[in-house]
Image (spheres, coloured by chain):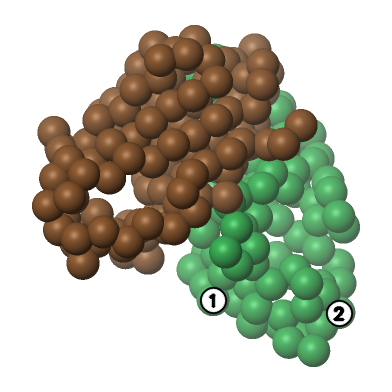
Chain colours: A brown, B green
Amino acid sequence: DAGVIQSPRHEVTEMGQEVTLRCKPISGHNSLFWYRQTMMRGLELLIYFNNNVPIDDSGMPEDRFSAKMPNASFSTLKIQPSEPRDSAVYFCASSLSSGYGEQYFGPGTRLTVT
Amino acid sequence: GNSVTQMEGPVTLSEEAFLTINCTYTATGYPSLFWYVQYPGEGLQLLLKATKADDKGSNKGFEATYRKETTSFHLEKGSVQVSDSAVYFCALSPSGGQNFVFGPGTRLSVLP
């Protein structure tokens, strides 16, 4: 299996622009997670989906952030409008909800907002 | 609520030294416990796990034992290598839950 796939790997954008991050989970996994990692705040869970349904979005910072999972093999995290404080590495992870919960992480997208 | 506490880093060791990274947790019920490792520029990778009290997880020479009486899951390795330099995260998964709680991470640097 190719593992969790994220694109793009790097994104540089200007403040105010819309940013869309993409994730393809491991085939057969039915839970998907979006995390944000910064030096100051560490690893933060933004949102997670089970069977394509958002279960917990309490970590989404504000209305500028939105996430969708239209089908079992694709999810997006959108920031509109972006701000410099959104600069971080964004990780997607997937898991089998019937397992012991181990999550498999993608390589991350490094976002820089200038 | 659920939480994970790890020893603060960075931890710097010489090659072949003994490693311990402390992890303690607070949780209701019977969580599963995990150690993840993040190498520079990469995502987190599962290193080992334990799903019930007294279980020992092990992988690549690393070990951790699920101690319910002390609510701990300390990571150990008898002889570290330069290639072990990374950030190590302790995490728990609440019983029946999917929502992980990660510790802040401990950066390990191993010098030749």
Q: Nearer the viewer, residue B68 or A2?
A: A2
Vertical placement of residue A36 versus A39, above or below: above
Amino acid bearing label 1: Pro
Q: Is residue B30 visible?
A: no
Helix, strand or loop under label 2:
loop
Quadrant of residue B21 in the image?
Answer: bottom right
Tags 2 and 1 both on a single chain: yes
Question: Residue B32 at x, y = what percent?
Answer: 63, 30
Quadrant in which the C terminus of chain B is drawn: bottom right
Question: Residue A107 at x, y = what percent?
Answer: 57, 50
Helix, strand or loop under label 1:
loop
Question: Residue B43 at x, y = what percent?
Answer: 58, 52
Question: Badge 1 local density, few (<14 within 10 Å), some, or many (20+)?
Answer: few
Q: Is residue A29 visible?
A: yes
Q: Chain of mark 2?
A: B
Numbered label attached to residue B10: 1
- Residue that label 2 marks: B16
Q: Is residue A51 left or right of residue B76?
A: left
Amino acid bearing label 2: Glu
What's the distance in space between the residues labelled 2 and 1, CA to CA?
Answer: 18 Å
Question: Residue B40 at x, y = what percent?
Answer: 60, 67
